[in-house]
């Protein structure tokens, strides 16, 4: 869930709770105020009645005085004035309704009169409901408009954040391209962008240092490794070596050979990342594959491998050397990880190349297969850089590569 969506939900929940609570409070508060107004009118009627009695000595006529009903009753002693509610028949509404009732006593004509004042509350209730509905509708409208404005404003405010995330998503450390982060006046996003730029700068420096070290180390290793291999070649050919010594020297020779291959692969990766294969031209990919098939033919016959080849005309815009390395690695993998009597399948279309092979090994980890030094369980003698080199070449050549495992076949599909 997005942050501003969660924020809007929280705000909406709080506003709804406040809306309901304020509605209840507002209703009772408004009802209380209107009842107080009614009580003041009836208290004023009491004062007028007492003034009339003091002036004339008699009770005023028992008229309705508008909505207020008045009734006199002779009692034996005074009572304390009291307000109350009472249900009675309302002749104006022609139905039973709630009345506000006010009792007080007034001495007149040598007697004590109990005065009963009653005023219907139907009009007050209707007025209360009308005011509440209008007020709540206004508040609800304001809340809806506020939420809409809030959503639009939040989306606008968070736009620099999403632009920053998009820039970081497209950033690749190996390309060493400057990241363009959006300009913003929001302090938090400015702080975020500054820290990201600083982190990227440090990462690029460390990456460049590591890459230079790898390239230099791989390059420097080539000469002594070549010297060691040549010396071993001469030493192995000596006739005075025992069988045990010869086997040990062969193991040493294989170890040096693997080390040389590892050094060469690391050097090749460094060259690809440094974009030293810059020359690009249109390549007849069908012609390239046919040449590779002729080169691998003897190897496949020795390993009793069958070839199923279906080629159509196709071309690709890439570096010729990188294309050779790409095809070599793909075909070498298909040969190396096959079984005796197995099959290699090559299918070429206008913008797609699929190379697959049979094999004993189960499906490879599709999430890690192109990572450096990833090796399947049965390939511990390999350096784990072949597929990483393939991936790097594909990225440099704008080629999409996918791996899948179907019908006991490992399938590598290239699309451009």
Image (cartoon, helix red, strand yellow):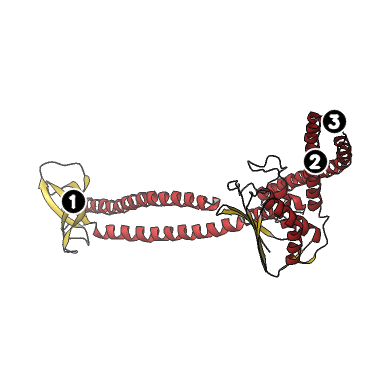
Task: Tell me the number on the disc at residue 241.
Answer: 3
Compare marks 1 and 2 and give the one earlier in the sequence: 1
Task: Tell me the number on the disc at residue 53.
Answer: none
| In the depicted structure, whether residue 76 falls above or below residue 178 | above
- Find disc 2 in the rendering and name its residue: 257
Q: Residue at x 39, y 58 (%)?
A: 136
- Residue 326 visible in this rendered orientation of the protein: no
Residue 45: x and y in percent read 24, 54
| In the depicted structure, whether residue 162 falls above or below residue 290 | above
- Find disc 1 in the rendering and name its residue: 86
Q: Measure the C-alpha gap from mark 1 to mark 2.
A: 109 Å
The 10 Å Cα crowd at callout 2, few under 14, some 14 to 19, many 20 or more, is some
Q: Residue at x 73, y 66 (%)?
A: 286
Give yes or no for contact between labels 2 and 3 (Cβ–Cβ under 8 Å).
Answer: no
Image quarter for residue 321?
bottom right
Would residue 45 appear left or right of 239 to someone viewing this image?
left
Residue 44: x and y in percent read 27, 53
Q: Nearer the viewer, mark 2 or mark 3?
A: 3
Compare marks 2 and 3 and give the one earlier in the sequence: 3
């Amino acid at each position: 869930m997005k942050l501003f969506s969660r924020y809007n939900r929280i705000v909406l929940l709080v506003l709804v709770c406040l809306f309901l609570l304020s509605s209840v409070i507002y209703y009772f508060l408004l009802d209380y105020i209107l009842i107080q107004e009614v009580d003041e009118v009836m208290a004023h009627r009491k004062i007028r009645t007492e003034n009339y009695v003091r002036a004339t000595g008699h009770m005023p006529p028992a008229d309705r005085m508008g909505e207020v009903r008045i009734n006199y009753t002779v009692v034996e002693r005074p009572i304390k004035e009291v307000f109350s509610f009472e249900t009675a028949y309302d002749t104006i509404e022609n139905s039973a309704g709630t009345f506000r009732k006010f009792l007080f006593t007034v001495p007149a004509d040598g007697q004590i009169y109990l005065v009963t004042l009653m005023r219907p509350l139907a009009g007050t209730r209707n007025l209360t409901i009308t005011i509440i509905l209008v007020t709540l509708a206004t508040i609800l409208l304001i809340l809806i408009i506020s939420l809409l404005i809030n959503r639009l404003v939040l989306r606008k405010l968070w736009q620099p954040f999403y632009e920053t995330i998009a820039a970081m998503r497209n950033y690749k450390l190996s390309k060493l391209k400057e990241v363009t982060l959006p300009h913003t006046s929001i302090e938090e996003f400015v702080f975020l962008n500054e820290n990201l730029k600083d982190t990227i700068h440090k990462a690029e420096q460390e990456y460049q240092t590591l890459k230079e070290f790898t390239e230099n180390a791989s390059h420097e290793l080539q000469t002594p490794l070549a010297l060691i291999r040549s010396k071993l070649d001469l030493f192995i050919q000596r006739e005075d070596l025992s069988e045990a010594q010869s086997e040990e020297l062969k193991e040493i020779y294989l170890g040096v050979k693997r080390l040389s291959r590892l050094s060469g692969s690391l050097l090749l990766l460094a060259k690809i990342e440094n974009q030293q294969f810059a020359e690009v031209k249109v390549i007849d990919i069908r012609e390239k594959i046919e040449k590779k098939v002729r080169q691998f033919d003897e190897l496949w016959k020795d390993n009793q491998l069958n070839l199923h080849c279906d080629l159509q005309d196709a071309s690709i815009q890439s570096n010729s050397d990188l294309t050779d390395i790409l095809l070599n690695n793909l075909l070498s993998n298909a040969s190396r990880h096959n079984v005796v009597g197995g099959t290699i399948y090559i299918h070429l279309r206008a913008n797609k190349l699929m190379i697959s092979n049979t094999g004993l090994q189960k499906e490879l980890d599709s999430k890690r297969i192109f990572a450096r030094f990833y090796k399947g369980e049965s390939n511990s003698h390999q350096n784990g850089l072949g597929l990483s080199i393939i991936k790097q070449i594909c990225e440099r050549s704008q080629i999409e590569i996918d791996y899948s495992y179907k019908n006991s076949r490992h399938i590598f599909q290239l699309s451009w």
